[in-house]
């Protein structure tokens, strides 16, 4: 398992934009169809906006129609961790960066093959490096 990165709230705040901070460190959600990547189709690797770890590939990105960038799998299972989120009167699977615990989004069981999963992520949690 890779080493964790921990920083103080103040350090994260100085590094991130207000929206990035609210989403990744306070489990916020950007509004649908407003993020920088919901409609991105370019090839590349999506990195964690907080620690730079490569998390998702454009090869697993698909158009879900939700207004959030959606993937059917991470680059590697070890790159992300999940928790059970019982907020908002729902039981959902929360997903975050394994390295720095940045909140990324939620996982739903209505994705395409081969995994059948939809990683519904916030653009604000990601940084695309086009290849
Ligand atoms: Zn991270």
Image (cartoon, rainbow, N blue to C red):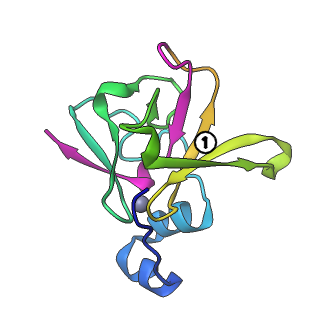
Residue with the most extreme left position:
131
Residue 23: percent from left, percent from top:
54, 60
Name the one closer to the observer, 20 or 71: 71
Q: Nearer the viewer, residue 63 or 113?
A: 113
Up-down relation of residue 95 to residue 24 (above or below): above
Magenta-tinted stretch:
113-131
Which quadrant holds the N terminus? bottom left
Left or right side of 101 for 47: left
Quarter of the rendered image showing ligand 1: bottom left
Residue 33 higher or lower than 51, as above or below: above
The residue positioned 73% from the left and 47% from the top of the image is: 84
Q: Tell me which corner region of the image, top left, top right, bottom left or bottom right, holds residue 131.
A: top left
Q: Residues within 10 Å of mark 1 (few under 14, many from 20)?
A: many
Q: Position of residue 75 (x, y in %)?
A: 35, 37
Picture quadrant of residue 106 = top right
Looking at the image, which is closer to me, 14 or 109?
Answer: 109
Query: Is the shortest distance between ligand 1 and the CB of mark 1 under 8 Å?
Result: no
Q: Is residue 119 left or right of residue 50?
A: right
Q: Nearer the viewer, residue 51 or 1?
A: 1
Name which residue lies at 56% across and 25% down. 117
Pointer 1: what residue? 106
């Amino acid at each position: 398992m890779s080493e964790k990165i921990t920083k103080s709230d103040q350090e994260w705040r100085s590094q991130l934009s207000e929206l990035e901070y609210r989403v990744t460190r306070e489990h916020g959600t950007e509004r649908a169809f407003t993020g920088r990547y919901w409609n991105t189709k370019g090839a590349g690797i999506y990195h964690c906006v907080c620690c730079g770890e490569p998390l998702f590939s454009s090869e697993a990105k698909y158009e879900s129609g939700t207004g959030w960038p959606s993937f059917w799998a991470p680059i590697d299972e070890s790159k992300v961790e999940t928790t059970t989120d019982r907020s908002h009167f729902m039981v959902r699977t929360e997903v975050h960066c394994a390295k720095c615990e940045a909140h990324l989004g939620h996982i739903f069981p209505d994705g395409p093959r081969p995994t059948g999963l939809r990683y519904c992520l916030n653009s604000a949690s990601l940084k695309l490096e086009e290849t």
